[in-house]
Each structure stands twice: as C-alpha cells, then as structure tokens.
C-alpha cells in the first residue's frame, strides 16, 4: 500500500479530471502533474538541505548551527528566503547587466531539469526518457555556461578567475564522468534510468552494481567527478573564499546569490540521487517502500558530501587538473576493460579476475602518478625582508 | 500520444515552466527590495582597495589547450555510448575493435602527458 501511495494519489486526480477532460488533454494533465510535483519537491528539498548542511557542518566544528528560528532552527531557511528577497541588489556599474541578470536564472534551469530523469521510486519518475542518463550528463554540464557568464559579466578579477577555473575544471571532469557510466550502460544495455534501477533488483533488491569490481571503481569515479562537477569542497577552487573571495559569485547579492546557492544544492542532490540509482541499486531494497529506499540512499550520499566539506582541505588548481587528466581519466578508460573481463570470463573466476585487474590498474596508475609528485622543491628560496613587506 | 512524443512534449513544457520558476524570484525581489545606488557601492569588489586596471583582459592560453584536449576525449565518450548500449549483442569482435580504438586514444593521452601539456603553470 505504502509502496504505491503516490502513484495512487496521481491516479485519483486523473480519474477525477477524467469526467471533464478527454484524450490528449488528460495526457497533458498527467505530464503537468509530474512537473508540478518536481517543481514543488525540489525547492522544498533544497531549503532543508541547506538547513541539514549548516547543522551538520556546525556539529563537525563543535558549534550549534541555526537554532533560533523555530524548533531546532527548522524555520531558518524561510527566514533566509525572506531576507534574501528584501536585500538590496548591488551590481558593479561597469558590469554587463543583461548577462549579469541572466546567469543566476540560467544556472537554475539545468539544476531543475536534472530532476526530470531521476527515478524516485518504482514507476515514480517525472519522464522515463529512453536516453535518460545521457540527458542527465549533458544537462548537468550546461551549468558551466552560466558560471562562466556570471564570472565574465561581473567585470571583477576574482569573478573572472573563478569563472575560468570553473570552466577548466568542469570540462576536465566531464570526460571521466561520462566514461565512468560506460560499464553500467554495457551491463544494462539501456540508457533509461528506470531500466538501470530495475536491472539491480536481483537478490531481493540487493544486487547492487557497487558489488561488481567495475561498479566499485565506477562509483568512486562517479562520486569524485560528480563532486568536482558541482564545485563542492574539496574541489571548490572556482569559489575558494581564501583566494578568490567568492569566485564567480563575488558580485552577486540578494536573490541572485540565493539562486546560485539553490542550483548548487539541487545539483548536489541530483548527483547523490544519480549515484544511488546507478551504483547503489536505486529504489531497490527489501521490505521498505521503494521511494523510502531511494531517499535513504541519496541522503546517505549527501551526508558524505557534507562530511567531505567539513573535513577536507581545498585542492590547489594544478592538483585538481592533474588529478582529472592523469589519474581519473586512465582509470575510467581501464574500467571499460574491467567490465569486459567480468562479462567475457564466466563464473567466479571472471569475477575474481576482474577484481584483481581493477585493483592492479588502480595501484599501477597511483604508482605512475606518485613518481613525479614526491620530488621535493629544489628551486631558489627567498625570504622576504621587512623592507619588501 | 505515443511515449516518444509525450516524453519530448514533457521536456519542452518543463523547460518553459522551469525558466518561469527561476525568473520569478529575481523579478519579485526587483519589486520588493530597496534601491539606493552609490558610486562606491557600484565599484567592483577588490577587498576594499581601489580597483587597478580592467578585468576584461587577454587570458591565459592554458585554458584553451585544455579545451582542445577535452574535445577529443568528449567526442570519444559520445562515440562509446552507442557501442556500450549494444555491447552484449555485438559480440567479441566489436569489443576488440573498441579496444583498439581505446588504445589509440590512450596513446594520445600518453602523448599529451609526455608533451607536458597537462601541467598547469
């Protein structure tokens, strides 16, 4: 009963509307209901994700976090929203005003479009697109356009640097992100996210792809590249406050800044949800309803993202770029061969062989990379004199 | 409506709704918020100092090199996706072909690496 509660609700509405509408209009209504549900769910989710992040980061840093507005600070996101909308908007006089206004709007569009192909439960997906996962990665990459637009149009050096870094970082991590999905697509033979979730329903819903060697490596690659794609710590060089003030959103205030925050949290949740769908079995699981399993898994991954933010220091930009091209990209290419070994050699031998091959690739590429990086600095050392300071 | 048509009708309408949804807060805040501009406020923020020079300058070539390497590998990803969908039906020969293709690209990566174009100066 609980399993299909949301589907029954929608069927009830459609049956009620069936008396007044017919054929095509009823189909359209069914689509519009899906859209409205996504558009209501996503902002509400984002409000409480910000609350959760502030609470958890506060806990990591031995603080209380928001606790004044409502019980446990639960109304804090509402108060923030009111404050943001009433705040004066300060734009540099020299900025490109049209692009400056367009950028925050354009960054929210892909963040919300991504929610259209996330399967929230058995039969609960806004649109079961036959190219679902491909749509997801192509749409998520569009966010960089808005970030570059924001950085360039502000006419501020920090903003410009942040925008350019973001572009360089996102295109570098785009390649391993796309390649980390290939083994899953090879195994499932379908690009639809609903079919990918359904393919993991064996063993009472516990046949998750992370148990395969290619799924394990793919999950690690997807998470790392996903975090880099959405510019979160430890890959938040485009908005690193210790070097670039606020990065691409230095010159944004009020509601425009809130939209950037919104896009960041929405895409963080979308990446968590997609990682849960692709590698952790999606909505599959024993006993509990499918949508509850999906939410539990994606919130667990989102918790890990917050945990990273609370504990990891930021990478330098050269480390970020080298990590993508020299470590993740070769591993993502070799992961396709890991999947092929698992497929072509049958039984337990193939499974063991692909684990060994996967671990071998991992440590080999690690060894190649650490060869050059371990060298100590041998250049000239200059100590600034008081006069030079 | 067939599944295919309804899927893309959905995306079309959803795109319009999302655009309106994203524009509403910006327009609403334009109506509600105070507006007291001044020359100091409208300067670009450079840690409180007076600004030095323009931000729109010629930029580092390194970003362009990364973009070139990116295009090669992203086209590769797009080429692999259709192959991966039919991987199980095509059999071992198609896999061997793809392996050769991947090896050639791997050589390309090694070449770029050895040419030190992946270093960030």
Image (spheres, coloured by chain):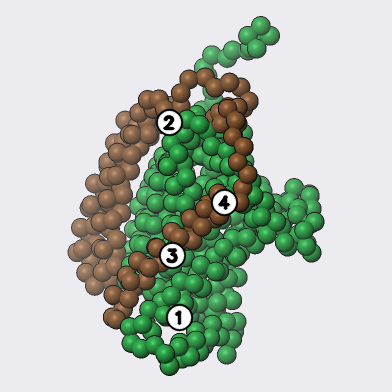
Chain colours: A green, B brown
- Chain ID of residue with mark 3: B
Cα separation between marks 2 and 3: 41 Å
What residue does disc 2 label?
A: B120
- Chain ID of residue with mark 1: A
Q: What is the number of the mark on residue A123?
A: 1
Cα separation between marks 1 and 3: 23 Å
Residue A274, position as x, y percentages in the image: 47, 64
**Residue at far top of view:** A387
Q: Secondary structure at mark 1?
A: loop
Q: Tell me, yes or no, whether dots 4 and 2 are on the same chain.
A: yes
* Residue mark closest to the camera, 1 vs 4: 4
Q: What is the number of the mark on residue B17?
A: 3
Q: Name the one closer to the observer, A119 or A157.
A: A157
* Residue mark closest to the camera, 4 vs 2: 4
Q: Secondary structure at mark 3?
A: helix
Other-residue count near label 4 (Cα within 10 Å), few / some / many at <14 / 14–19 / ≥20: few
**Figure quadrant of the C terminus of chain A:** top right
- Chain ID of residue with mark 2: B
Mark 1–mark 4 CB contact (< 8 Å): no
Residue in the image at 55% along x and 55% along y? B28
What residue does disc 4 label?
A: B31
Residue A241, position as x, y percentages in the image: 60, 37
Q: Name the one closer to the observer, B100 or A254.
A: A254
Residue B34, position as x, y percentages in the image: 63, 44
Other-residue count near label 2 (Cα within 10 Å), few / some / many at <14 / 14–19 / ≥20: some
């Amino acid at each position: 009963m609980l399993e299909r509660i949301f589907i029954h609700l929608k069927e009830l509405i459609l049956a009620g509307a069936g008396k007044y509408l017919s054929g095509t209009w009823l189909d359209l209504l069914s689509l519009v209901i899906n859209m409205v549900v996504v558009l209501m769910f996503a902002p509400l989710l984002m409000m409480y994700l910000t609350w959760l992040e502030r609470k958890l980061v506060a806990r990591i840093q031995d603080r209380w976090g928001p606790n004044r507005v409502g019980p446990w600070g639960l109304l804090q996101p509402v108060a923030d929203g009111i404050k943001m909308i009433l705040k004066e908007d300060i734009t540099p006089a020299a900025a490109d005003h049209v692009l400056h206004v367009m950028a925050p709007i354009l960054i929210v569009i892909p963040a919300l479009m991504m929610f259209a192909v996330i399967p929230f439960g058995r039969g609960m997906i806004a649109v079961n697109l036959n190219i679902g996962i491909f749509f997801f990665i192509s749409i998520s990459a569009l966010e960089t356009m808005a970030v570059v637009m924001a950085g360039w149009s502000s006419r501020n050096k920090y903003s410009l640097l942040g925008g350019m870094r973001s572009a360089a970082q996102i295109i570098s991590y785009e390649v391993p992100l796309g390649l980390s999905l290939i083994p899953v697509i090879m195994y499932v033979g379908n690009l639809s996210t609903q079919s990918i979730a359904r393919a993991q329903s064996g063993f009472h819903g516990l046949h998750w792809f992370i148990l395969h060697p290619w799924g394990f490596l793919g999950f690690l690659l997807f998470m790392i590249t996903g975090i880099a794609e959405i510019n979160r710590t430890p890959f938040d060089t485009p908005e690193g406050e210790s070097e670039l003030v606020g990065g691409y959103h230095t010159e944004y205030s009020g509601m425009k800044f809130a939209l950037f925050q919104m896009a960041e949290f929405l895409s963080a949740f979308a990446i968590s949800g997609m990682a849960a769908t692709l590698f952790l079995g999606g909505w599959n699981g024993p006993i509990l309803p499918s949508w509850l399993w999906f939410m539990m898994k994606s919130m667990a991954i989102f918790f890990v993202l917050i945990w990273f933010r609370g504990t990891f220091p930021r990478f330098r930009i050269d480390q970020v770029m080298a990590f993508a091209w020299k470590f993740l990209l070769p591993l993502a290419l070799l992961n396709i061969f890991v999947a092929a070994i698992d497929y072509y050699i049958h039984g337990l031998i193939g499974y063991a062989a692909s684990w060994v091959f996967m671990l071998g690739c991992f440590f080999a590429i690690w060894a190649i990379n650490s060869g050059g990086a371990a060298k100590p600095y041998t250049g000239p050392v200059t100590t600034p004199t008081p006069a030079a300071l | 409506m067939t599944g295919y048509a309804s899927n893309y009708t959905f995306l079309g309408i959803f795109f319009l709704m999302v655009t309106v949804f994203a524009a509403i807060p910006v327009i609403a805040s334009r109506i509600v918020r105070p507006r007291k501009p001044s020359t100091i406020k409208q300067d670009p923020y450079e840690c409180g100092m007076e600004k030095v020079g323009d931000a729109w300058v010629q930029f580092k070539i390194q970003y362009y090199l990364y973009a070139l390497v990116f295009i090669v590998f992203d086209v590769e990803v797009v080429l692999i996706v259709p192959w991966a969908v039919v991987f199980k039906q095509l059999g071992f020969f198609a896999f061997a072909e793809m392996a050769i293709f991947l090896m050639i690209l791997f050589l390309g990566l090694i070449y770029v690496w050895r040419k030190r174009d992946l270093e960030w100066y």
